[in-house]
Image: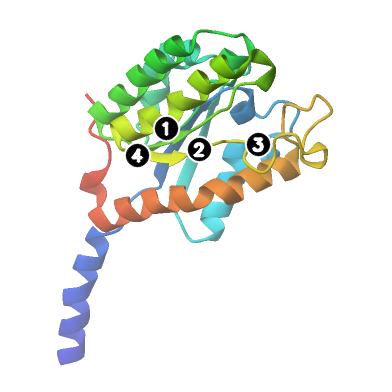
Amino acid sequence: MLTLVVVLAIVPAFAKSTPSSPVVILVLGDSLTAGYGLEETETFPSQLEKKLQAAGYDTNVINAGVSGDTTAGGLARLEWALADKPGIVIIELGGNDALRGLDPAQTYANLDKILARLGAVGCRTILTGMKAPRNLGHEYYNKFDQVYPDLAAQYDVLFYPFFLEGVATDLELNQPDGIHPNAVGVQRIVAGITPLVTTALDEINASGPSSLSNYQ
């Protein structure tokens, strides 16, 4: 009888630490998220979901990537994307800003607004950095590259310094255009960023369902 009482006492406490439904993870990005040139099962959101579920996490990773999107485009469709009420948002934007040579101040301002909105609704946010092409000159790429660590520090969010870390410039990990990762390259990206995602998930699991985003 004593054993049964102990079990009944433990189960409710444990139940409070685990969300009752899958944690929605939204990946807001451009073609690197959308999966340009890849099958749906090879995209970053799809591979991330598969890896997380294999590790025992109950998640639903939503692909909110639009090829060619800039940070301005991501900002413009943010409210629509938040209709899925994600608990975690991964931001992968800015590559097209750099490719178009847009003013880094614009990139900063757009990402600033995105981060502020996500903070307002209580999302756990992971900001992934991007690096500008070096042929744009050191003055430009230094300003552009610094946008991401500055914003990550300002908003105290989880930060992955370079989305294409370990993949950029590696011919074996990219498609023929040299810009978009192939399926193996995406697998490398997923492996790199997964520890940050599980950190966010563990925080949610430890805090319980009430810790998930409070949307207005």
In the rendered structure, which disc, 3 or 2, sits on the residue that comes first in sequence?
Answer: 3
In the rendered structure, which disc, 2 or 1, sits on the residue that comes first in sequence?
Answer: 1
Mark identifier at residue 161: 2
Mark identifier at residue 87: 4
Quadrant location of the N terminus in the rendered image = bottom left
Task: Give the residue at mark 3.
Answer: 43
In the rendered structure, which disc, 4 or 2, sits on the residue that comes first in sequence?
Answer: 4
- What residue is at 37 percent from the left and 28 percent from the top? 151
Could you tell whether 188 is left or right of 174 in the image? left
Amino acid on which disc 4 is placed: Gly
Could you tell whether 200 is left or right of 146 in the image? left
- What residue is at 44 percent from the left and 23 percent from the top? 147
Mark identifier at residue 149: 1
Does residue 5 lie above or below 119 as drawn?
below
The CA distance from mark 2 to mark 1 is 7 Å
Q: Does the CB distance between marks 1 and 4 fall below 8 Å? A: no
Figure disc tally: 4
Mark 4 closeness class: few <14, some 14–19, many ≥20 residues within 10 Å: many
**Which element type, helix, strand or loop, lies under badge 1?**
helix
Mark 1 closeness class: few <14, some 14–19, many ≥20 residues within 10 Å: some
